[in-house]
Amino acid sequence: MRSWFHLAWLLTLAACTGTGGWHKPGVPQEQAARDYAECRHRAELALRRDSNIDTDILATRGQDWARLGTLQSTRDEYDDSNSARSGDIVERCMIAKGYAAGR
């Protein structure tokens, strides 16, 4: 469950950034924020299944990894992977909508 909560927290944190630094000429800030929120939502939906699988694996293998001293690093790997994939999905979505990163 930790991976799912971590992903949800990252997406919530990203929501606080408005448009995430994306812009498109002639598009009002409010529309850009809506498009960005839609792309973040798509990323959340796309990663939900994988996050649930990660949670199940951690639940069943967590004690083994804890004994080996690798539980936290395994959690971190899952979180990093999900965060990178989320960012990639958002980036592709925004580009597909005609936005460019940065200002």
Image: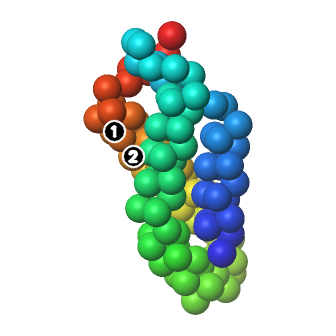
Name the residue rendered at 70%, 43% in the picture.
13
Query: Is residue 99 found left or right of 19 in the rendered image?
Result: left
Residue situated in front as seen by the camera: 72 or 37: 37
Per the rendering, the mark at residue 72 is none
Residue type pointed to by label 1: Arg
Residue type pointed to by label 2: Ile
Q: In the rendered image, is residue 61 in sight?
A: no
Query: Which quadrant is the N terminus positioned in?
Result: bottom right
Q: Secondary structure at mark 1?
A: helix
Q: Which residue position holds label 1? A: 92
Residue situated in front as seen by the camera: 37 or 70: 37
Residue 10 in picture, x, y percent from top left: 65, 49
Q: Which residue position holds label 2? A: 89
Name the residue rendered at 68%, 49% in the picture.
12
The colour scheme used to paint the residues is: rainbow
Query: Is residue 85 found left or right of 3 in the rendered image?
Result: left
Q: Is residue 14 above or below residue 60?
A: above
Residue 78 in picture, x, y percent from top left: 53, 61
Residue situated in front as seen by the camera: 61 or 101: 101
Contact, mark 2 vs mark 1 (Cβ under 8 Å): yes
Residue 87 in picture, x, y percent from top left: 47, 42
Using the rendered view, name the quadrant where residue 62 is placed.
bottom right
Name the residue rendered at 45%, 53% in the picture.
43
